[in-house]
Amino acid sequence: MTSDANSMIAGDEGMVLVSKLDNLINWNRKSSIWYLLFGLACCGIELMQTGGPRSDIDRFGAVPRATPRQADLMIVAGTLTYKMALRTKLLYDQMPDPKYVISMGACATCGGLFQLAYSVCKGVDKIVPVDIYVPGCPPRPEALTEGFMRIQDKMMRERWVGKLGNPARAV
Amino acid sequence: MAKASKQEEAREKSPTRPVGQKIHEAIAAKFGEAVELVDAIDPFTVVKDVVLFSEVMKFLRHDPSMQFDFLRSVTGVDWPEDGYIDSVYHLYSYPLEHAHVVKYRCPRAAPEVPSVEGLWPTANWFERETFDLLGIIYLNHSDLRRIMLPDDWTGHPLRKDYTEEQDYRGIGTTRASPLAAFKQMDETRAKAREERGEDAPAPIVSNIEPPADWVDPKEKRKAEAAAKAKAAAAAKAAEAAKAAEAAKAPEAAPPAATDGEGENE
């Protein structure tokens, strides 16, 4: 287990781990974040690099999914036009709870370089709630990995036991 | 004056100009004064009449001396001050390897242009795009819908007088600058410090010394610009002096000598 809250007891039969159930659930969740393949512009290239062998977020158990129905995390990578914004909302609604959103790069965060263009949405947070903003144009794979780890931190802080009727985001 | 001559020079040098002039000659021979032939680096043709436009395009497409079989692009230009919109056609001929540009000039109030889809099928999508962004209506087009913007979009964004809507389907089209919030944060902190009776924190100063031979590039550019301006002023003064001298004594020294003087300065 990872946190100080956990402790180990050496027993006769072997090792016994004691932890909170919340920590166990969250540890499992954060070790298999499946993200939606959602490259909209040049940030998508860096997103691919992040999944590639050098940065390799596969080591966190993160694998790209081609369908929102199997994804926990949506990485909005690139310039979001109004036409795409409606589709983005649709994709987000199709993801099962609990779900998280990373706004990757300047364009997804606020419109970026194209903020004054008539067709560009001024930030993905106008459409869906955003958990982590990763600045950069585009952000390097290191930066996106950092954002990814902040999502893991957020997951570890969530509480489930006793809240199963109404879990997740409110925590 | 110098600018105009520079333009003329560029026109003289232009490798595509003779080709354009040849095409102009052919068009003038066929249609006479009715079409406007503009001589430029790339000569182009302006047509204002509907019937004539169709005739010109047919001529360019099918005439053995033209054979423009490839429509490269259809675009448009909005001229709100002059009250018209241009629909611009870039044509190319693969068999004869020459190119030409035709503009159809229509009033801004009723921008209607006959479609050239019958001559070049590719015009279908080009004209949809120009309709989408500039609002030019292409008559007899088989399927004149928006092609890039959403179907429920209002207005044509490449018109010069286009203003963005306040929202699109409930999505706001403006975003507040974060600078105001930062400023407010600074002010709040300063006020809190004042209440606690604390001094403002010292400004952050770099403790890294630049190398001894380092020159600020801004200062360097400034010095260079000043030196250039000084040289230009000196050259101008020398020229004026030369002119005055020439006026005083018309049979004065040969120009080569004065040139030498200018160089010495």
Image (cartoon, coloured by chain):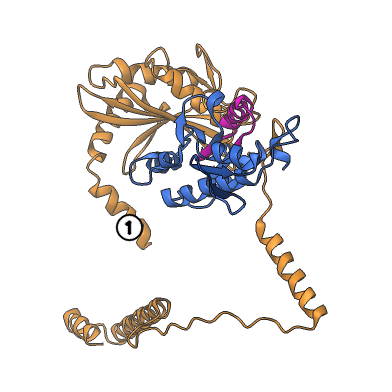
Q: Colour of chain B?
A: orange
Q: Which residue is mark 1?
A: B5
Specify start and end residues of the magenta stretch as a single range.
A75-100
Residue B223 is at least partly visible in this image: yes
Residue shown at 34%/43% (left/top)? B40
Residue A25 inside the magenta-drawn segment: no
> What amino acid is at disc 1?
Ser
Camera-side residue of B51 and A90: A90
Mark 1 crowdedness (10 Å alpha carbons): few <14, some 14-19, many ≥20: few
Residue shown at 36%/56% (left/top)? B4
Residue A93 inside the magenta-drawn segment: yes
Residue shown at 62%/51% (left/top)? A5
Q: Image height check: is B115 above or below B221?
A: above
Q: Colour of chain A?
A: blue
Q: Image height check: is B53 above or below A82?
A: above
Camera-side residue of B136 and A137: A137
